[in-house]
Image (tube, rainbow, N blue to C red):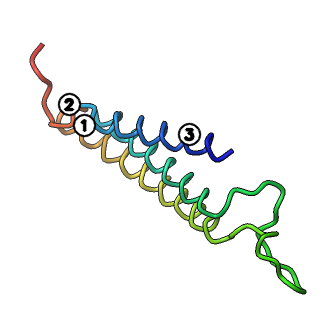
Amino acid sequence: MELIVAIAIGVLVGAGVWLVLRPRTFQVIVGLSLISYGVNLFIFSMGRLRIDRIPIVGPGPVDPAQFTDPLPQALVLTAIVIGFAMTALFLVLLLALRGFSGTDHVDGKEPPP
């Protein structure tokens, strides 16, 4: 399980970095989103990967091995909302930039063919 999650994190971050280095702004936005998904998965995996365990501690004696950590789950939920707002803001900026410059190239001008 941990190996699959580690490979998924590596693929998401690697593809995100590759897209961030591309010359088009839409590809940069998608790359930033993939990097944020990889970081979210990393934060989520820090809360111990357990199957069929509840994150809430009930009354009575508490054995920490029986529960997952709810803090990474809360952090990931917050990061998802912030990432969605960031992506929406970047898309609006992309549309405004394309309207002003007529191109979606990162430098604002197309390279000669």
Residue highlighted by disc 2: 102
Q: Which residue is mark 3?
A: 8
The three-letter amino acid code for the residue at tag 3 is Ala
Query: CA–CA distance between discs 2 and 1?
Result: 5 Å
In this view, the residue farthest toward the right is 60
x 25%, y 36%: residue = 98
**Which image quarter: residue 81?**
bottom right
Query: Marks 1/3: CA distance?
Result: 36 Å
Image location of residue 84, percent across then percent down: 50, 52
Mark closest to the chain's N terminus, 1 or 3: 3
Three-letter residue code for mark 2:
Gly
Taking 86 as reference, is 105 above or below it?
above
Please name the amino acid that badge 1 sits on. Gly
Secondary structure beneath dot 2 equals loop
Q: Mark number for residue 52?
A: none
| Residue 27: % across, % down | 35, 33
Residue located at (35% from left, 34% from top) = 19
Instruction: Identify the residue at horizontal 59%, vertical 61% (top origin).
Output: 46
Judged left or right of residue 98, residue 75 is right
Residue 41: % across, % down: 57, 51
Q: Relative to 29, does residue 44 appear above or below in the rendering? A: below
